[in-house]
Image (cartoon, rainbow, N blue to C red):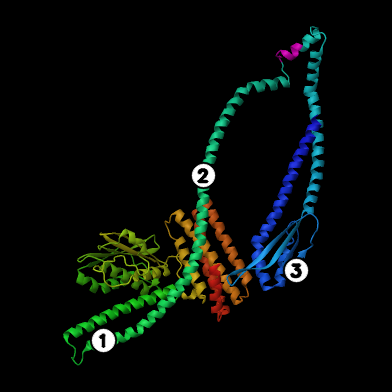
Amino acid sequence: MVVGASTLITIVTTSIQLYSDYKSDLASIDQSFASIRISHLPSLIQDVWTADDTLIHTQLNGLVTLRDITFIAIEENGKISWMAGKREEGDVVEEHIALIREYQGKDITIGNLIVQADLDAVYQRLLDKLLIVLATNALKTFLISIFILIIFHQLIGKRLMTISQFLKSDHPRSLEVESLVTKVAEPQDKPDEIDKLVGAVLNHRQTIHKAYQEMNAANQKLDQLNAELAEQNSVLSDEIGQHKVTSEALVKAKSAADELSRVKSEFLASMSHELRTPLNAILGYGQMLELNMDKTLSEAQSEYVSHVIEGGYQLLHLVNDILDLAKIEANRVDLDLSDFDPLPLIQRCISQIFPLAEPAGVTIKLETENRTPQLVRSDAARLRQVLTNLLSNAVKYNHAGGSVIVRVNTIHDDYVRVMVIDSGHGIPKQKQSNVFKLFHRAVADAAVATDGMGIGLAVSKMLVERLGGRISFISEEGSGSSFWVDIPLAKNTTVLIWTDDLRVGVDAIDSDHQGIFALINEISRENIRTRELQGIVDRMISYTSYHFRREELIMEVCGYPDLIQHKALHRKLEAYIKGLKSKWEKSNDATILTELRKFLREWWISHILDVDTKIKQHATGKEHEITMALQVLAKN
């Protein structure tokens, strides 16, 4: 009976195991098919489109080595053009996958991929395993059964036989029977193993019952915790999914925005140059009339001429701002970096604004902390342009008799902060999110400020970020505004500033590199919240992948000779960044974040200077092909 039960258990467990293995093998085949569709189908489509026999045969020979894949072929117009392996006629699983290629905005079927998996190999593996498992389990069952029978006979069988004899005895009152009854029914001075076992079970019955109750309570608590964990996982999964969708949408939006920005920049630059030519003529003739050397102009006419010249200079200033904007957005602004003490420059900016503040009775006060001179690394002319714009706005949008305070101090030992505080009208809360947008004026009342087109702050923000700094503000309507600029110190080793020696010479690549530099500077900010930092790191990963796709496409169009090695560098960087991000999110270890920041700065500088700068020599003369290829990529 024991042997029969063991055999039955062996058959059942073996059947379950073999069925599980069979399902696993079928799933493995499905996974191989899915892997081919996801990982290899795009490259096969491209190779078939270009009719590259070498690459097609290489890929097919590699795919046919997948487990249980015995035959793979590409069919064109009902005929097999390329194949690998041997096509079987027995019990097989075969799948036909259409090769679809987009051409001129339409999907075209250029062939079919035939993939065949042989089930005979699966059956043979199952049969081999069945024989091994049955033989092993049979031997194991036999040995265990023999052992159990021996133990049972020695420890229990004899006792049970004795009790059985007692029950069958024809002389229940005989001395022998009485002895047996006494031995079985009454407690013994020296209880045997069975007596001890029964006693232990009885003694522990209450303990087991209590433990069972505690286990039920623990299970209920565990169920509650699992429910809470499932709810939290669901929320987290939704957030991750939403963030993934958002990241992909941001990449597509960035591509479209880059194209729109390029067209807009070209238009602004062209229009600005077209406006400057007649404007210079207007100013020139106006200045000649203003001289009035023949004294032929009346007093009213002279006043009209002065208004013409004043308006001309305002228009010239606007045209210059538009030209600056076009250069910055086209990533063609030149920076002249140097190390200098910013305080004298700030004082010159204040002196320049005094003539604007004096008629309105606006006072300007400079406040500095007691410190030794701190050197910053920046472009003095561009920094002066930014500070002059902030001071000019502080005066123009101020009350008559108001005040402006310029406060200079060092923050985090890495930046010098220049804050311009005014007592003016302030910015309405609903308009604050648009302050740094183009052609936006925070105060629409013409009585407050009549000149300006809302370009200055947008240009200032772009310049400050190009210089590795930060610009922001706080404001309350009716109480004034405080704008500040953070300028990196010369000793700051965490900030990246784009300079001409990093320029590759291909506009699309240079633009992407500058965007990556800006993201690295955001990651390097101190005192940033974890959730915000996670978002920036995710944007960095998405933008890096987006840039690599564009750069690899450009290199392919240009016939870059080391494309495969270059792609390998890209994949290695992507994997390393994702690995560091995963480690940091699991441990929240600040040292990992520091390692990520340092690695990104050093890798990108080295990669651009040592590798990417070689692309230009292959891209020369292929600007049109590059533009068209990038436009196609942006649409996909």
* Residue on which the image places disc 3: 79
Q: Is residue 488 left or right of residue 218?
A: left
Instruction: Answer whether labels 3 and 2 touch (C-beta < 8 Å).
Output: no
The 10 Å Cα crowd at callout 3, few under 14, some 14 to 19, many 20 or more, is: few
Sequence-wise, the earlier of marks 3 and 1 is 3
Residue 6 screen position, x and y as percent: 78, 34
Tell me which corner region of the image, top left, top right, bottom left or bottom right, holds residue 626.
Answer: bottom right
The segment highlighted magenta reads 181-189
SS label for mark 2: helix
Q: Is residue 297 left or right of residue 491?
A: left
The amino acid marked with disc number 3 is Lys
* Residue on which the image places disc 2: 231
* Residue on which the image places disc 1: 287
The amino acid marked with disc number 1 is Gln
| Residue drawn at the location 81% of the way across and 34% of the way down | 143
Instruction: Answer whether labels 3 and 1 touch (C-beta < 8 Å).
Output: no
The 10 Å Cα crowd at callout 1, few under 14, some 14 to 19, many 20 or more, is: some
Picture quarter with the N terminus:
top right
The amino acid marked with disc number 2 is Glu
Residue 441 screen position, x and y as percent: 32, 67
Instruction: Answer whether labels 2 and 1 touch (C-beta < 8 Å).
Output: no
